[in-house]
Image (tube, rainbow, N blue to C red):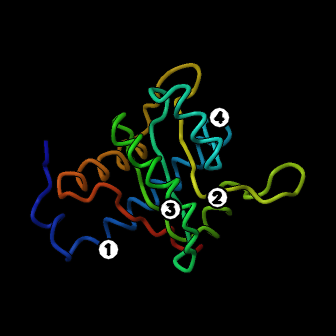
Amino acid sequence: MCNMTFEETSGDNSSERMESVAKALEEVLSSALPQGCITVGVYEAAKSLNADPDNVVLCLLATDDEEEDVALQIHFTLIQAFCCENDINILRVSNMRRLAEILGGVKPGGEPMDLHCVLVTNPQSSPWKDPALSKVNRFCRDCRCLDQWVPVINLPDR
């Protein structure tokens, strides 16, 4: 069910709403990270999605504009199809540098993380009841009502 107001669908309010959703996404990632509820990497995400799709609450696909890796785009297409089939919200995220800042960006050995695909999962103890996650999920749902199945969010530099 779509409950967007005219203001939300028109361009007047869209930049403010995008900033609000980007901030909520940063909050979700910042709170999920210490709980161990983040999976990074295309391969790791595919394994997690295959093993327990019901535990995934959000999928982020990230690239920089100048990136044109055909294999990565094929992986994205497959992950998007899987997420749509399993009712998992998906966001396309631009500004990988900011995403790396939020998530730490480096593995313990100093090797950079593959941040092209990031999954947020439920904590082991209980499902999330996070207002920031609710805001992001509502945004994804509203975008689907407008036939925008994979909305794009730009994480602003800090």
Q: Earlier in the sequence, mark 2 or mark 4?
A: 4
Which amino acid does the dot numbered 2 rest on?
A: Ile
Quadrant of the frame with the C terminus: bottom right
Disc 3 + disc 4, Cβ < 8 Å: no
Q: Secondary structure at mark 3?
A: helix
Tell me if 130 is positioned left or right of 43 in this view.
left
Q: At label 1, which amino acid type do we have? A: Ser
| Label 1 sits on residue | 15
First in sequence: mark 1 vs mark 2: 1
Q: Residue at x 35, y 66 (%)?
A: 18
Secondary structure at numbered mark 4: loop
Going by the numbered disc 4, the residue's amino acid type is: Gln
Q: Which residue is mark 3?
A: 73
Q: CA distance from mark 4 to mark 1?
A: 31 Å
Q: Residues within 10 Å of mark 2 (few under 14, many from 20)?
A: some
**Badge 3 or badge 4: first in the primary sequence:** 4
Q: Are marks 2 and 4 in contact (CB under 8 Å)?
A: no
Disc 2 is placed on an element classified as helix
In the image, which is nearer the foreground, mark 1 or mark 3? 3
Which callout, 3 or 4, points to the residue nearer the camera?
A: 3
**Residue at 59% from the left image edge and 22% from the top image edge:** 124
Q: Say the numbered circle drawn on residue 35.
A: 4
Kind of residue indicated by mark 3: Gln
> How busy is the neighbourhood of tag 3: few (under 14 within 10 Å), some, or many (20 plus)?
some
Q: Earlier in the sequence, mark 1 or mark 3?
A: 1
The image position of residue 6, as x and y in percent, is 9, 64
Q: Could you tell me residue 156's position as x and y percent?
A: 51, 72
Label 4 vs 1, first from the N-terminus: 1
Outermost left residue: 6
Q: Which residue is mark 2?
A: 102
Q: Which residue in the rendered view is the most extreme toward the top?
A: 125
